[in-house]
Amino acid sequence: MDSSFSSSTSLTDDMPIATPPEGEHERREWLLRVLGETSCRMLGIYRLPNDLTLSVVIPVYKEMRTIREIVRQVRAVPINKQIILVDDCSTDGTRELLQEWSRTEPDLTIAFHDKNQGKGAALRTGFALATGQIIIVQDADLEYDPAEFPKLIQPIVEGKADVVFGSRFIGETHRVLYFWHSLANKFLTLLSNMFTNLNLTDMEVCYKVFRREVIQGITLKSDRFGFEPEVTAKVARFRMPPLDGRPARKCRIYEIPVSYNGRGYEEGKHITWKDGFQALYCIFRYAYTD
């Protein structure tokens, strides 16, 4: 929701619309009443519990060019948020900026690694710090748009899902980049599906959303980009504990299309062919065991 929505906006000179209330929750409820729930869902406006907190975990490594903008975009999303940044021993000035923010930006939870360990290690640190009912992974490189948070968390909010994967391959716009990367992603997803018995289309996607009890109930071990196949294998096996007299059950997993503005290596992309082999190893390693 754009906070710049003007109270003086009118449909015609003699048909002014009511002034929207202050506050994100109140403004959302006002729009749902004015436009109706069906129209709002088409616009990406969803009803959210007033007490919901979304923990946004952002692993950071040498992202000086983009870190300010991604934090701005995450802050702009009209959801109560806990923003967690984990610096994985950056050496390009990012670490110093985050150290300054840790003193001056009270809405940010910031952690620092003393040595570079990888995305998976940074995410483990972030997950341990998360206190929101729902946790989402957000990269710091502007490839993914935080404005899509509301639609990604909605299946969990509505009680339909326990885990949500984004997908770059089922209908949303994306930047055209590397053919072989795309082919490798699809091959790794297919192989992962064969072992997990899921029908995902994009196992390697950044946007993964979890109920807190799911991701904090899993023991993760991969330090680098092996996180993606490892967490996929483990949520596929995870059983939700009994609740309100209902028996334990397997995780319900949804997939939601997301847009993708991929970057090239000259723009700072970190993943390499070595990570592809690591993903293969993790698919086989975590297929049936922790």
Image: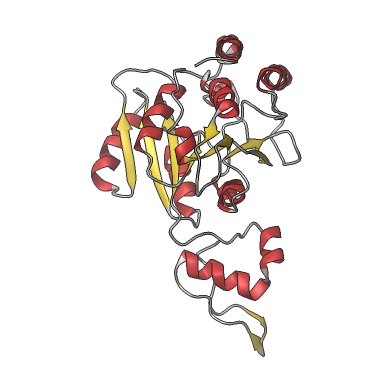
Give me the residue at 34% from left, 45% from top: 108
> Visible in this render: residue 5?
no
Place of residue 216 in the rendered image (x, y in percent of width and height, measured from the top left) = 43, 33
Residue drawn 33% across the image and 49% down it: 107
Whether residue 2 is situated above or below residue 75 in the rendered picture: below
Which residue is painted at 59% across and 35% down in the image? 251
Q: Residue furthest front?
A: 245
Placement of 106 over or under 275, stated as above or below: below
Residue 87 in the image: x percent, y percent? 36, 29
Q: Taking 270 as reference, is 167 left or right? A: right
Judging depth in this view, the residue of 230 and 150 nearest the camera is 230
Q: Position of residue 135 (x, y in %)?
A: 47, 41
Report whether residue 115 is seen: yes
Locate the N terminus by quadrant: bottom right
Lateral position of residue 193 relative to residue 153, left or right? right
Q: How many marks?
A: 0
Whether residue 186 sits left or right of residue 153 in the image: it is right
- The residue lying toward the viewer, choosing from 17 and 188, is 188
Residue 5 drawn at (x, y percent): 55, 69
- Specify the farthest residue to the left: 103
Based on the displayed image, in which of its 4 quarters is residue 71 positioned?
top left
Q: Residue at x 62, y 31 (%)?
A: 262
Q: Quadrant of residue 273?
A: top right
